[in-house]
Image (tube, rainbow, N blue to C red):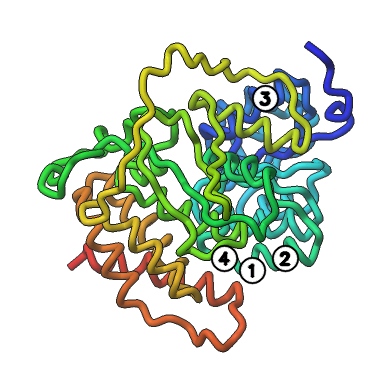
């Protein structure tokens, strides 16, 4: 295995280090001996202790202050500094000495750390799609201002990033996001009446966290990815298609103006996407297994059922509205999914309530500049409206 000498001199920050993407990012770091400067998580004390002892980060940020206090006692014999709360997390993002800031924090909690890292001129490896869904205009403007690259980690956007290397931006006709279809492909609304959280968090192809697995089951995840792609690649939403591809071998495609379609293929393993983001523009041997075409019996494609899975079209609606409507949709969905996972509402309640809140929310004046205050207020209001909706 050839040494990656240029990476030996750089380091990474992994925010969301105890989640699915975060732990796989540390697998890549372990494999390539990439130094880890900073880690961050919500509260998983034992996992964080193990990560501190193995990777010896300079700083560990913990959202939950009581968990941070416990962790500080457990790792008192190490040199890792423990910081806590939202302020500590943002400080860690601003002051990390890492060259690459990988954000795998779940949901809106990832937005402000991303902005902090961008303002500190760190390259961002982004696995937190909500950052761009809720505040894409602000985040991309800040990245441009600070001359910061945002490298996508999501498998679909990682694929598009690679496919776009085959032509000029002016030659791109459309982006094609592939979608596994989730656990309920082929089902109609009546089939989804009694879905339980235990069932909804099982994904047919990917090993993911509970929230994103529910989003995949409802196809909201693909809706969020449409908006993410629009901001990442400066594409009109009407030029971003979604196709169901059950095998998850083709991770996304780009169609050029001559009707040539370039696709990126690999086995469904996030280690590849993470390593690509951490080593870009170089490629190195990785831990993802080789794709054996003799074992690929079929590659199938279908149109998504947007009548049953109406959140996919809702995302297009939100993106076209602009302003704070994407923020509202994202926040309403986060709140509804949380209630579902706590067995307080039904699976279909997610679809109906998120559509209701999003489509009836009054947007800001689009002639005025969008601010973080607008984003944070809309996020708060949408969550309040969801909880109010189900408390009646």
Farthest front residue? 258
- 135 over 7 or under it: above or below: below
Question: How far across and how far down the image is residue 24, in percent?
Answer: 59, 27
User: For the N terminus, which image quadrant?
Assistant: top right
User: First in sequence: mark 3 or mark 4?
Assistant: 3
User: For the C terminus, which image quadrant?
Assistant: bottom left
Residue at 78% from the left image edge and 50% from the top image edge? 122
Question: Mark 2 — residue?
Answer: 142
Residue at 57% from the left image edge and 76% from the top image edge? 373
Q: Are marks 2 and 4 in contact (CB under 8 Å)?
A: no
Badge 2, how many Cα within 10 Å: few under 14, some, many 20+? some
C-alpha gap between disc 1 and disc 3: 30 Å
User: First in sequence: mark 1 or mark 3?
Assistant: 3
Question: How far across and how far down the image is residue 230, in percent?
Answer: 55, 60
Question: Mark 1 — residue?
Answer: 138
Please state which of residues 250 and 74 is positioned toward the viewer in this rendering.
Answer: 250
For residue 135, which numbered disc appears in the image?
Answer: 4
User: First in sequence: mark 3 or mark 2?
Assistant: 3
User: Is disc 1 placed on a helix, strand or loop?
Assistant: helix
C-alpha gap between disc 4 and disc 1: 5 Å
For residue 28, which numbered disc appears in the image?
Answer: 3
For residue 86, which numbered disc appears in the image?
Answer: none
- 5 over 303 or under it: above or below: above
User: Is disc 3 placed on a helix, strand or loop?
Assistant: helix
C-alpha gap between disc 2 and disc 1: 6 Å
Residue at 70% from the left image edge and 68% from the top image edge? 141
- 257 over 30 or under it: above or below: below
Q: Are marks 2 and 1 in contact (CB under 8 Å)?
A: yes
Badge 3, how many Cα within 10 Å: few under 14, some, many 20+? many
39 relative position to 354: left or right: right
Q: Are marks 4 and 1 in contact (CB under 8 Å)?
A: yes
């Amino acid at each position: 295995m050839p040494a990656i000498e240029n990476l030996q001199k750089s380091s990474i920050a992994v925010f969301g280090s105890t989640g699915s993407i975060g732990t796989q990012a540390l697998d890549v770091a372990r494999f390539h001996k990439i130094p880890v400067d900073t880690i961050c998580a919500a509260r998983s004390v034992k996992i964080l202790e193990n990560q501190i002892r193995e990777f010896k980060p300079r700083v560990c940020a913990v959202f939950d202050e009581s968990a941070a206090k416990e962790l500080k006692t457990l790792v008192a014999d190490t040199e890792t500094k423990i910081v806590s709360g939202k302020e500590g997390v943002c400080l860690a993002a601003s002051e990390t000495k890492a060259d690459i800031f990988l954000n795998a924090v779940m949901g809106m909690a990832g937005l402000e750390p991303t902005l902090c890292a961008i303002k500190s001129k760190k390259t961002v490896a982004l696995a937190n799609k909500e950052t761009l869904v809720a505040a894409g205009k602000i985040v991309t403007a800040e990245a441009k201002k600070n001359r910061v690259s945002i490298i996508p980690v999501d498998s679909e956007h990682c694929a598009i990033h690679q496919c776009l290397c085959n032509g000029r931006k002016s030659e791109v006709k459309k982006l094609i996001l592939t979608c596994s279809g989730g656990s309920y492909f082929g089902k109609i609304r009546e089939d989804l009446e009694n879905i339980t959280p235990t069932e909804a968090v099982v994904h047919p192809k990917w090993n993911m966290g509970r929230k994103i697995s529910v989003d995949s089951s409802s196809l909201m995840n693909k809706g969020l990815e449409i908006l993410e792609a629009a901001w990442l690649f400066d594409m009109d939403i009407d030029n971003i298609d979604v196709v169901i591809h059950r095998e998850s071998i083709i991770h996304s495609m780009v169609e050029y103006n001559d009707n040539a379609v370039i696709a990126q293929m690999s086995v469904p393993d996030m280690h590849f996407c993470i390593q690509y983001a951490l080593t870009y523009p170089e490629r190195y041997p990785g831990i993802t297994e080789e794709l054996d075409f003799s074992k690929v019996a079929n590659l199938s494609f279908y149109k998504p059922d947007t009548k049953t899975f109406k959140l996919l079209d809702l995302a297009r609606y939100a993106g076209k509205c602009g302003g704070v409507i994407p923020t509202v949709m994202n926040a309403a969905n986060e709140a509804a999914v949380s209630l579902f996972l706590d067995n307080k509402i039904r699976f279909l309640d997610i679809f109906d309530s998120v559509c209701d809140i999003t489509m009836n929310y009054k947007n800001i004046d689009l002639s005025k500049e969008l601010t973080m205050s607008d984003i944070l207020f809309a996020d708060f209001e949408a969550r309040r409206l969801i909880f109010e909706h189900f408390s009646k």
